[in-house]
Amino acid sequence: PEIGIIDLDLSQKERAFYAEGSVDRSIFDKKGILTAGVAWKFKEIDDAPVWDVYYPDYLGSDELYYLPSVTPVDSFSRMWSFFSQYRHNFGNYNFWVGVRKDIHEIYGSPPSFNTGVSWVPTNDYVMKLIYGTANRTPSGVQLLENSNPDMEYIRNLSLQLTYKKDRVFKSSLTGFYNKIDDHILEDPNVGASEPNNQKIWGMESDS
């Protein structure tokens, strides 16, 4: 990508390669499905722009002295990923559990997993209970300020009720709870914040 901001021209180059292999196998008289796989990712970035300070929202073409300085950052990384999932059907119930481990050469990340159960009492209703974890990739500012930043770790618990009628109408209601550890805020004036923890309750619907 090439970006032009007033009289400042920024150019960035990126190269990436990704490969993945997986296998599925039916077990327990085809009531269960076991999936396992491995993936490898290579990514190289040249001259990624990282703004040193706050970038103003309103600038005119004659304001050439208020542009903040930019630090070009080169990034080179490789990552192995190992993942597995098992699903099993019990009549109107479907249970699953999965785990994933990413091995990154720049920053470490704990394993993430998800598990859940779905229940189909009738052809019109589906209820799902899901619990899972995830990690957020560090931003460019975090990597610039800290070569080994803490990964943002998210835990999510959700309960969803879905109603669907004759494949034409579909509506769902979902309640969720998120707990975030080592959460980083990027303040536009002072940069990245210290890691903090957050808890979020919410509900969403769609149709």
Image (cartoon, rainbow, N blue to C red):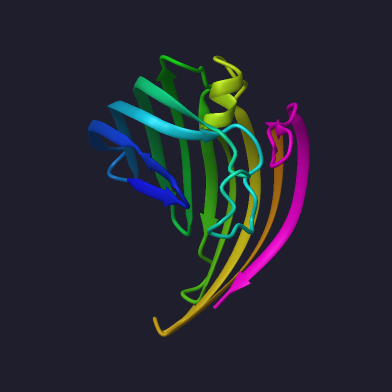
Q: At 25% from the left edge and 32% from the top edge, which residue is drawn? A: 15
Query: Could one spot residue 111 in this view of the protein?
Result: yes
35 to the left or right of 133:
left
Q: Outermost residue toward the front?
A: 62
Q: Nearer the viewer, residue 176 or 196?
A: 196
Q: Position of residue 183 (x, y in %)?
A: 69, 34
Q: At 46% from the left edge and 42% from the top edge, which residue is drawn? A: 96
Q: Position of residue 186 (x, y in %)?
A: 67, 38
Q: At 56% from the left edge and 47% from the top edge, which residue is drawn? A: 64
Q: Is residue 170 above or below residue 75?
A: below
136 to the left or right of 195:
left
Q: Nearer the viewer, residue 164 or 49?
A: 49
Magenta stretch: dominant SS? strand
Which portion, as a residue range, is magenta? 182-207
Q: Nearer the viewer, residue 191 or 95?
A: 191
Q: Quadrant of the N terminus?
A: top left
Q: Position of residue 84 (x, y in %)?
A: 37, 31
Q: Quadrant of the C terminus?
A: bottom right
Which corner quadrant of the image does residue 46 belong to?
top left
Q: Is residue 128 above or below residue 194?
A: below
Q: At 63% from the left edge and 37% from the top edge, which residue is drawn? A: 154
Which corner quadrant of the image does residue 12 belong to?
top left
> Magenta stretch: residue 190 in it?
yes
Tally of numbered discs: 0
